[in-house]
Image (cartoon, grey):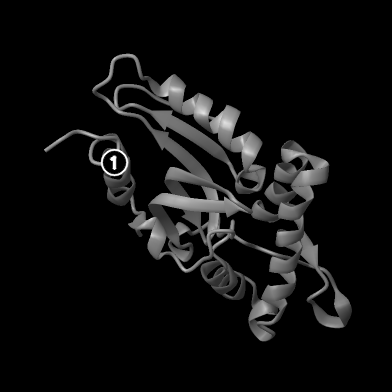
């Protein structure tokens, strides 16, 4: 058997995630279009599950998702840092919507930080993201309730000239520049060649 990124380092990362409670799903089998940043089905389910006011009227979940999509689109004008900060407010539960009695604003939760069992934790590999004719493929993506919050690049462990630095450069210099919308929900990214593991945001 030949050694490659996919059957060595990438698989090691996937196995580590699964052993820590994440569910593995092959990237191509996820319920999304290649142009989608979010996996909207689990995101909608989480909104309904974690927010009683949305559970009362499930179509309110679509109102929230509409606002989240607008933040993705804003990256072209506002830049990645500002758009990332805007979406982080939603992820942290700092945003409200007028879903309470008489239009009272209530907090909207996308993630349950108190009980992780209430969240859907998915790790996938070979995630394809397409913008127009441009297509990028990410080695490892971790999603919480359909939000791709972690992106990882795995490099071959058998070529001494290739290190985690090459993976980090690919994420920072290529991916973040060419497909910034994928990094709007990002909490951090990582790179590894199996010997060293580095992460940052």
How many residues crowd mark 1 within 10 Å: few (<14), some (14–19), many (20+)?
some
Left or right of 93? Residue 168 is: left
Residue extending farthest to the right is 102
- Along the viewing direction, whichever of 50 and 2 lies nearer the viewer: 2
Mark 1 lies on a secondary structure that is: loop
Q: Quadrant of residue 48?
A: bottom right
One can see residue 10 in this view: yes
| Residue ID for mark 1 | 6
- What's the residue at 34%, 53% (across, down)? 21
Q: Quadrant of residue 176?
A: top right
Left or right of 173? Residue 25 is: left
Q: In the rendered image of this protein, does residue 16 appear above or below residue 158? A: below
Q: Position of residue 127 (x, y in %)?
A: 45, 51
Q: In the rendered image of this protein, does residue 180 appear above or below residue 156? A: below
Q: Quadrant of the C terminus?
A: top right
Q: In the rendered image of this protein, does residue 81 appear above or below residue 198? A: below
Q: Quadrant of residue 27?
A: bottom left
Q: Position of residue 63 (x, y in %)?
A: 74, 73
- Along the viewing direction, whichever of 22 and 109 lies nearer the viewer: 22
Q: Position of residue 149 (x, y in %)?
A: 54, 47
- What's the residue at 46%, 57% (across, down)? 116
Residue extending farthest to the bottom is 56
Residue extending farthest to the top is 161
- What's the residue at 19%, 33% (across, down)? 3
Q: In the rendered image of this protein, does residue 170 appear above or below residue 80? A: above
Q: Position of residue 4 (x, y in %)?
A: 25, 35
Residue extending farthest to the left is 1
One can see residue 201 in this view: no
């Amino acid at each position: 058997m030949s050694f490659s990124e996919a059957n060595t380092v990438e698989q090691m990362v996937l196995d580590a995630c699964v052993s820590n409670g994440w569910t593995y799903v092959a990237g191509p089998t996820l319920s999304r279009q290649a142009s989608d940043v979010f996996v909207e089905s689990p995101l909608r389910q989480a909104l309904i599950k974690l927010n009683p006011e949305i559970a009362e009227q499930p179509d309110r979940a679509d109102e929230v998702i509409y606002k989240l999509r607008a933040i993705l689109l804003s990256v072209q004008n506002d830049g990645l840092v500002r758009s990332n900060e805007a979406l982080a407010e939603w992820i942290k539960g700092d945003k409200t919507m007028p879903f309470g009695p008489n239009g009272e604003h209530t907090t909207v939760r996308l993630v349950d930080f108190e009980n992780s069992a209430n969240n859907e934790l998915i790790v996938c590999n070979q995630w394809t993201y397409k913008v127009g004719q441009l297509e990028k493929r990410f080695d490892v993506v971790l999603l919480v309730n359909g939000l791709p919050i972690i992106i990882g690049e795995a490099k071959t462990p058998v070529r001494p000239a290739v290190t985690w630095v090459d993976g980090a450069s690919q994420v920072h210099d290529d991916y973040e520049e060419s497909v910034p919308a994928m990094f709007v929900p990002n909490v951090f990214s990582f790179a590894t060649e199996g010997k060293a593991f580095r992460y940052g945001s």
